[in-house]
Amino acid sequence: MFRKVLIANRGEIAVRVMRACRELDIRTVAIYSDADRDAGHVRYADEAYHVGPARPAESYLDAESIVEIAEQANVDAIHPGYGFLAENADFAERVETSPATWVGPASAVMRQLGGKTGARTVMEAADVPIVPGTVDPVTTADEIAAFGEEHGYPIAIKADAGGGGRGMSVVESEAEIEDALDRSIREGEAYFDDATVYLEKYLSDPKHVEVQILADGYGNVRHLGERDCSLQRRHQKVIEEAPAPGLSPEQREAIGAAARRGVADAGYENAGTVEFLVSGDEFYFMEVNTRIQVEHPVTELVTGIDVVKWQLRVAAGEEIDFAQEDVTTTGHAIEYRINAENPAEDFAPTTGVLERYDPPGGIGVRMDDAMREGDEIGGDYDSMIAKLIVHAGDREECLIRSERALREFDIKGVHTIIPFHRLMLTDQAFTEGRHTTDYLDEQVDPGRLEAAVERWGTASGDGGTGGNTSARTYTAEVNGKRFEVVLYGEEVEEEQPRQTKSPEPVADAPAGTAGERVTAEMQGTVLEVTVEPGDEVEPGDVVCVIEAMKMENDVITSAAGTVAEVTVGAGDSVETGDVLCVIE
Ligand code: MV4
């Protein structure tokens, strides 16, 4: 086994890989950019090396510098995580020619499967159903029109190197071909430096189902079951689960076997994912992801197999020690990506300091994260700051447990998409597992997202909802029972500080009074006393206003009666528990 591994990544996936390393007694080496000097993955690693400025191109994407650091740190292997250089065959090849081992498939296999037509050719040869279309590139509008004549519309024109929806145009009729072809070629060139495009029949409203694969250097290929990733927003997955709801046992078996066949023929080694579109009873190969994926934990929870550990083991030359029949799944798992985005504002990324970070726990709850309370979310990288993965006996229990876990999750300082997840748990299409890839973009009304943020959002400070009225929650004990009391107040402007008088000692509670004492729930300064002895008050009446932490807070009485005594005046400083007035 390796002695020392460099993790060419950041954030939760870097920490996830380091956790596997620690369990395998492997030393870990982090790299970090200017923006990440004190980031979670740096804190976790045994050693860390500065790689460059915040800009990914000059740090986490700087292949040469990373390989240099690997040599300097004398590591045995490089694990790329996901994103950044993970699917870059040139980087894999560069690592292969260095002293370090690449934790991933061979660069030649990455190249073969990285292009869509290449992957389709491999899959077709392995008798894996591919979406009807071409396996060779197309170049002219005439070829596309001929395809339309034969197979009908709609047609997808896809960039060979495409991914994440980039380079894909959908053509509804012959008249649209010319423009769509130009667009796909342009996007292929712009994003992937590759103008090659090909055709597929466009399937309407499919489900996205993908199969986790693990393969070693001895010809053993196992599939670890499938995941459903249909809940996506503009091609970004937000919720993933295993197993896929709605698949029949026969379909499940067939899709797993197909994925296994396909990669076995390609000489694949390490972990990988074979993506399919599922439409009715049919499934079709879409693409292969030659990396560990964000959503791998749902597979780990239902199979009990540590996929990242196996990546390291097979890269180190170990043989898979379980048979396909040994792979069984237990229960259901759902992953919720915790993105620092505001669902009410078209999922715009938000930045700020994590004033509070109190993640859920307990049975069936797994947190994959790297952030801690007090960390800053700077917006230099991906907005995904954590993943909550919930496991339970079946999907129904998993949804209930998810609601419990999301309710426990306390994040303040930035917006997150937790309110969105809580909305989905009330959404019938989702809870019944009927949602398809078009669902979120086309059938979830933005008004529902706004309402969800209003109801469940917890961001505060400049990440808050705006306006100068803020609610603060305090704890009150009334006759020994605990209450949460919400105080509404206006924020006090910094430039007009209210002058406090001398810190005159506040009168102690008058001894022996039979009345109800109204006490200060916070330390602060009395701005105004709104009652005087002899006034009649009712529960909920304001008795005074206290400024604390730049907020004006109304203090209300929970008792009814006559104000017997007022023990403070405007300008007094008060401590928590000080008596403000007595009501008889
Ligand atoms: C498709 C498709 C329907 N038919 N191909 C979008 C991203 C890219 N990787 C493939 N994509 C699709 N390809 C054919 N022939 C529908 C999509 C698609 C989609 C796929 C998976 C997850 C979410 C999606 C959202 C919109 C469209």
Image (cartoon, rainbow, N blue to C red):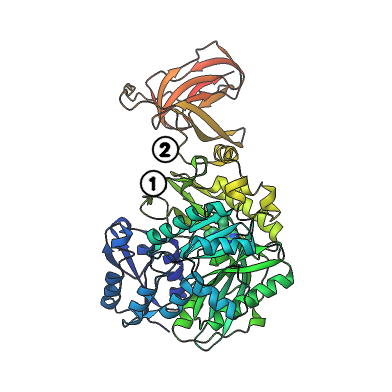
Q: Quadrant of the C terminus?
A: top right
- Residue 346 point in image, percent of width and height: 50, 43
The dot on residue 249 is: none
Q: Is residue 546 visible?
A: yes
Q: Amino acid at mark 1?
A: Val
Q: Position of residue 421 (x, y in %)?
A: 58, 49
Tell which quarter ligand 1 is in: bottom right
Position above or below: 195 against 272: above
**Looking at the image, which residue is at 51% across and 72% down?**
136
Return the residue nearer the eye: 359 or 36.
Answer: 36
Question: What residue sits 45% from the left and 29% below the top?
Answer: 467
Provide the residue designation for mark 1. 353
Residue 508's spot in the image, x, y percent?
A: 45, 25
Residue 237 vs residue 298, the one in the foreground: 237
Residue for badge 2: 461
Q: Secondary structure at mark 2?
A: helix
Is there a contact, CB below 8 Å, between mark 1 and mark 2? yes
